[in-house]
Image (cartoon, rainbow, N blue to C red):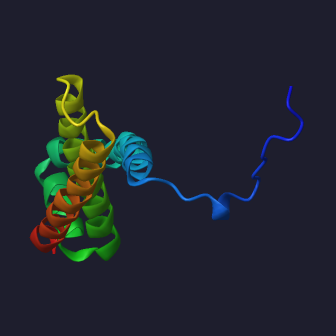
Amino acid sequence: MNKKRPVNLDISTISMPVTAIVSILHRVTGIILFIGLAFLFYAFDQSLSSQQGFDQVVEVLQNNFLAKFVVWGVVSALMYHFVAGIKHLFMDLGHFEELESGRMAAKANLVIAVVLILLAGVWIW
């Protein structure tokens, strides 16, 4: 084994390519969706339990900032995960596999996701 190989233990000095950032965010949003669905299932269960439960869920979602923020976070994760998933489907078909086209697709992924997340924020608030 070569003992003179470079070792970089300072993560703050490593510059990640945009494709790696998009890939990591895709995984992170998947985790957020998995956790966020527990809150959404609870609200759905409460809303179907009775008329009072439905009214309570509606009132919380209309007046509680934290509830709106959680819903916006889950919807934002869904939007990003959806856009990145579509990009991956195109990659499975053989598109965006070259270095430059992959970078452009990753940048487009970020731009489209940001636009959708902002629109979701306007819709929720």
In the rendered image, the quadrant that contains the N terminus is top right
Seen at 28% across and 74% down, the residue is 64
For the question of whether residue 44 can be seen, the reply is no
Q: Position of residue 86 (x, y in %)?
A: 17, 37
Taking the image as drawn, is residue 7 in sight?
yes
Q: Which of 2/26 is in front? A: 2
Residue at image position (26%, 58%) is 110
Task: Tell me residue 123's x, y (percent).
Answer: 10, 69
Location of residue 82 in the rendering, given as x and y in whole percent from the top left corner: 20, 43
Say above or below: 46 vs 63: above
User: In the depicted view, which residue is nearer to us: 71 or 15?
Assistant: 15
User: On the rendered image, what quadrant is the C terminus found in?
Assistant: bottom left
The percent position of residue 77, horizontal first and vertical second, equals 30, 52
Left/right of residue 48 with respect to residue 28 in the rendered view? left
Quarter-of-image position of residue 81: top left
**Number of marks present in the image shown:** 0
State which quadrant residue 85 falls in. top left
Q: Residue at x 30, y 49 (%)?
A: 103
Residue appearing at x 17%, y 23% in the figure? 93
- Residue 41: image quadrant is top left
